[in-house]
């Protein structure tokens, strides 16, 4: 692309273009859900905490045994840190995660009857639960509309132009403005799967991308 053409490329997507991107992503990735395996909101919370700085695939390798032996907050809260570390030692930051999961399990068992809180604020009070984790479990387990911005959602939405921000909080804010509320939770999954399959961090497969004609990154970089 010439410098002149690059200058002419739009800086943001129109409402119509955003809706078209969402329509195509839904067509491509509709029905997609989290890759994490879980049987209850508590297990989803633990799996999501474990997935930070790790991969869903690795987490899915350790949770079957962990959840079989300790399926709920009450049973998990009775583990020692060392015992839990033994189960999760193949994921990054496992010592800190073991500590947080045990503290969180104790709180959930004592105050929430083993369930998880239904608001972001209450979830973020739990040890080791940040905004992204809270949004993931809220939208999946509690069906509360939320957009969790992980590394894929951040990269893909800013490349396409669904957001134009240099941090996750601002990206989340803009996505909430640009995407209809009823699509927030699903759009989170569409963007993750688009990032995994097509819009990879290194060498995005722009030539195979169904939203390439709308994507600002593509239009600005040729
Ligand atoms: S065109 Fe390229 S940069 Fe844009 S969304 Fe598709 S793969 Fe990502």
Image (tube, rainbow, N blue to C red):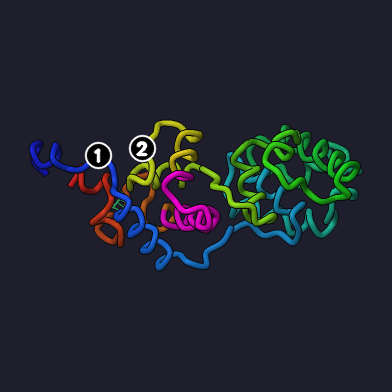
Q: Which residues are magenta?
A: 175-194
Image coordinates of residue 102 in percent, x first then y, are 82, 39
At mark 2, the secondary structure is: loop
Q: Does the residue at mark 2 contact the one at mark 1 (Cβ under 8 Å)?
A: yes
- Give whichever of discs 2 and 1 has the lower sequence position: 1
Asked if disc 1 is less than 8 Å from ligand 1, the answer is no
Which residue occupies 29% across, 49% down? Answer: 14
> Quick one: 63 or 101, which is closer to the camera?
101
Q: Nearer the viewer, residue 153 or 97?
A: 153
Would you say residue 205 is visible in this rendering?
Answer: no
Please state which of residues 54 and 123 is positioned toward the viewer in this rendering. 123
Q: Position of residue 206 (x, y in %)?
A: 27, 54
Residue 62 x/y as whole percent: 70, 53
Judging from the image, what secondary structure is the residue with disc 1 in?
Answer: loop
Is 194 located above or below residue 106 in the figure?
Answer: below
Report the residue marked by disc 1.
11
Instruction: State the residue at coordinates (63%, 56%).
Output: 36
Give percent across and percent down for residue 15: 32, 51
Please tell me whether the stretch drawn in magenta is mainly helix, strand or loop. Answer: helix
135 left or right of 212 in image: right
Q: Confirm whether the magenta stretch covers residue 193.
A: yes
Answer with left or right where residue 215 lies relative to residue 67: left
141 to the left or right of 152: right
Within the magenta stretch, is there residue 87?
no
Q: Is residue 127 above or below residue 151?
A: above
Mark on residue 164?
A: 2
Question: Compared to 165, does 177 lie above or below?
Answer: below
Task: Residue at 36%, 52% (x, y): give it.
Answer: 199
């Amino acid at each position: 692309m010439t410098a002149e053409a690059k200058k002419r490329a739009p800086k943001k997507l129109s409402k119509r273009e955003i809706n078209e991107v969402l329509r195509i992503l839904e067509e491509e990735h509709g029905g997609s859900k989290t890759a994490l395996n879980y049987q209850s909101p508590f297990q989803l919370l633990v799996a999501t905490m474990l997935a930070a700085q790790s991969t869903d695939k690795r987490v899915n390798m350790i949770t079957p045994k962990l959840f079989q032996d300790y399926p709920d907050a009450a049973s998990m809260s009775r583990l020692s840190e060392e015992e839990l570390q033994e189960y999760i030692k193949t994921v990054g930051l496992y010592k800190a995660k073991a500590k947080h999961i045990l503290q969180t399990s104790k709180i959930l068992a004592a105050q929430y009857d083993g369930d998880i809180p239904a608001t972001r604020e209450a979830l973020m009070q739990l040890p080791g639960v940040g905004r992204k984790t809270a949004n993931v479990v809220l939208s999946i387990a509690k069906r509360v509309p939320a957009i969790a911005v992980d590394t894929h959602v951040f990269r893909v939405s800013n490349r396409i132009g669904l957001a134009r921000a240099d941090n996750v909080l601002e990206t989340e804010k803009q996505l909430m403005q640009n995407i209809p509320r009823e699509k927030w939770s699903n759009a989170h999954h569409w963007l993750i799967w688009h990032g995994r399959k097509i819009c990879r961090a290194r060498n995005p497969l722009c030539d195979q991308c169904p939203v390439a004609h709308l994507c600002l990154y593509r239009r600005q970089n040729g």
